[in-house]
Amino acid sequence: MGTYNFNWHVVQDNLPQLMHGLVITLQISAVGMFLAILFGLFLATMRLSQYKAMSSISYGVTQVSRSIPLFVLLFWVYYGLSLKFGIKFSEFQAGAVALGITGGAYMAEILRGGIMAVDPGQQEAALAIGLTRFKASQLVVLPQAIKIVIPQAVNVYVGLLKGATIVSVIGVADMIYVAQYVSLQTFRPFELYSFAGIVFISLTLSIAGFAWLLEKKLSHGRVNG
Amino acid sequence: MAESKPAFDFQAIWDSRLILLKGFGIAMFSASAAIVLAIVLGLIISLMRLSRVKPLQYFAFCYTQLFRGVPLYVLIIWVYFGLAIVANVNIPKIPAGILTLALLNSGYLSETFRSGILAVPSGQREAGEALGLKRREITRFIVLPQAFRIVVPPTGNQFVDAIKDSAILSIIGVPELMRMAQQQANVLYRPFEFYTVAGLLYLLAVLIVSKFLTRLEQKLAGYSKSTKKVKPFEMVQDTTGSEVVA
């Protein structure tokens, strides 16, 4: 068994491309997160609606989009939808949409939990002083719910960031894609993927640590916890 | 575009049913084998984390952080291609996939088990000591059986995650459901139908497992003092504990 000679120069030489790939990864996960928040807010609002039918539909959609693997969604959106319905997504758009669908289901549950965690007395008080239901949500309930929701939302983002590594399978030029491309030319896949792995581990761990700090800080001022 | 073709052609799916079902079987087998291995690994790591020996604690901590931080895509390439290149170990595709899923899930499960073990009231351990049991005996006969009930729901959720994650094994060519769906979709040029059916099969598997878990939890809750019911899908703990009447 011969010893393997590591050659980390490969990483150094291709650092600009790898970093450009990282920027794409961050972009796609950010757009995905934005879509996830919109989708999640929509689902959570429906779920908490007074109408049983709305609530049931939202529950069903949440369960379905949470149960289907991101990998399958990605192919379904990129290859499936475009061929069947002629919706032409770019690779980036398809990736962001798939991330948004998966993340949206998690965000819906988190937002619902956050809204429900706000004392019902708050909404009753807001309604009693003459605010409309919409105004009461906007000015009284949501600002309090956000405090509870933010740390968990950051954790969802960490999940999406890790999930975003698979978008290279449909051809998004993210960091994994660059690592793959360069390793085909240099025959140094181990060094390149290890570098990508280390970058991702540092990113996810520091963001998760940030979420933990945020949670400690935000729970400080919470009245009903 | 494809006006001449029928809008939805599920005949192609029906013709490929055996291939898809075989893929489905391999996916389920991989996820199940991985979770069993992950439970064993996770338990070992959680006990190391809780041990009094400092180096074991540090090792367990790094292990957990590593496998919780690394994306599955990178891990699978490390295990399948990396080990082959660096250590000259050639693992066949399916075992490599199972090992990868097991490593990833063991990182999460070790944390679950650790909190489960810590959730057992310390009076139980003290009572064991008072009875003159050895440390190992206390862990084995008093703490772990009680921790078991606590960790069933999160472990079940991890199994659900493993089923979903198994789709990524197609990257290294494991002939599981997604790989088969991709192959058939390319050959028969029916991506929408194949990916929809693949998605539905994963959905079915996840729903069946969740249903089974809810049953199991109810059964376990019957034995335990705490009657608090934890639903497998409820990630968010409702801090008020009150249901909003819809």
Image (cartoon, coloured by chain):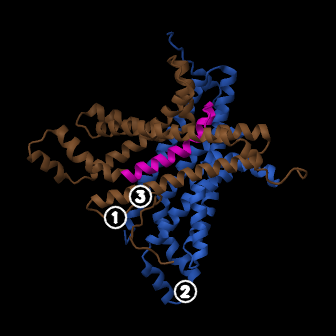
Chain colours: A blue, B brown
Query: Residue B191's spot in the image, x, y percent?
Result: 75, 45
Furthest-top residue in this view: A2
Amino acid carrying label 2: it is Leu
Quadrant for residue B226, please give it. bottom left
Determine if the magenta segment contains residue B157.
Answer: yes
Q: Secondary structure at mark 1?
A: loop
Q: Main secondary structure of the magenta part?
A: helix
Quadrant for residue B166, please give it. top right
Verify CB contact (< 8 Å) between mark 3 and mark 2.
Answer: no
Amino acid carrying label 3: it is Arg
Query: Residue A77's spot in the image, x, y percent?
Result: 71, 50
Query: Residue A37's spot in the image, x, y percent?
Result: 60, 61
Circle on res. A49: none
Q: Residue at x 51, y 9 (%)?
A: A2
Q: Is residue A16 visible?
A: no
- Disc number lying in front (3 or 1): 3
Q: Residue at x 35, y 50 (%)?
A: B151
Q: Chain of mark 2?
A: A
Query: Do the residues marked 3 and 2 share a common chain?
Result: no
Residue ID for mark 3: B215
Q: Secondary structure at mark 3?
A: helix
Magenta region: B152-176
Circle on res. A131: 2
Residue ID for mark 1: B228
Q: Chain of mark 1?
A: B
